[in-house]
Amino acid sequence: MRFNMRELFEFLEPLGKSAVFRFAVILLVTDTFFGILRAIREKRFNSCVGIDGAIRKAGMLVSLVLFFCMDLVLQINLIGFVPEQIRAASGLEKAGIMEFFALIYCMYEIVSVLKNMALAGLPVKKIWMKLKEWLKQNTGEISELPDEEESHDGK
């Protein structure tokens, strides 16, 4: 059996057309960028820049590809688990396993991007506070966000 790259790309073409998948990839790249800025500022590696961050990001991408393959076989629609606000903003009418996890990864990466922006010294304190409050109300979990003293400038 011979491996054919063209067939692989044709098989994965619908994945590349998914707006949720593309948004997740953009957030992964953005998080890495601000993680690099943070690492430069702190003069040390952090959770986004280094082997741990690379493994986490690669794991997210590979899992999305595998979830896409599962969706081709299982045809599960998880749109009922996606909040109406996110459905409206994303234009999703159907959410397979890949879209569902991509949305979760997007939320995680948005938090990580804001954390890296704050720790890199960018003035995002107001966004921070709103996000902290939203996470506290909706998940009870705010461990990913830096404390006031963790943020260098407190901005």
Image (cartoon, rainbow, N blue to C red):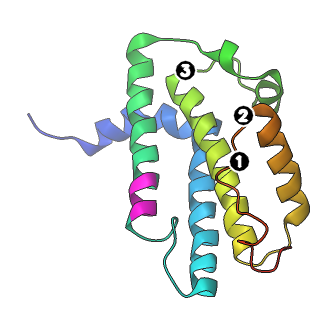
Region of the chain picked out in magenta, as a range: 52-56
Disc 2 to disc 1, C-alpha distance:
8 Å
Identity, as a three-letter code, of the amino acid under mark 2: Thr
In percent of width and height, residue 124 lies at 84, 66
Q: Mark 3 points at which residue?
A: 96
In percent of width and height, residue 133 lies at 85, 45
Q: Which residue is drawn at 17% across and 41% down?
A: 3
Where the C terminus falls, by quadrant? Answer: bottom right
Q: Residue at x 58, y 42 (%)?
A: 105
Left or right, 137 with reference to 117:
right
Where the N terminus falls, by quadrant? Answer: top left
Give the quarter of the image for residue 63. Answer: top left
Proximity of marks 2 and 1: CB atoms separated by less than 8 Å: yes
Q: Which residue is drawn at 91% across and 60% down?
A: 126
In this view, the residue farthest toward the left is: 1
Q: Name the residue under label 2.
A: 139
Which of the pair 68/100 is nearer the observer? 100
In percent of width and height, residue 22 lies at 60, 45
Q: Mark 1 points at which residue?
A: 142
Q: Nearer the viewer, mark 2 or mark 3?
A: 2
In percent of width and height, residue 66 lies at 38, 32
Identity, as a three-letter code, of the amino acid under mark 1: Ile
> What's the magenta bit mostly, secondary-structure-wise?
helix
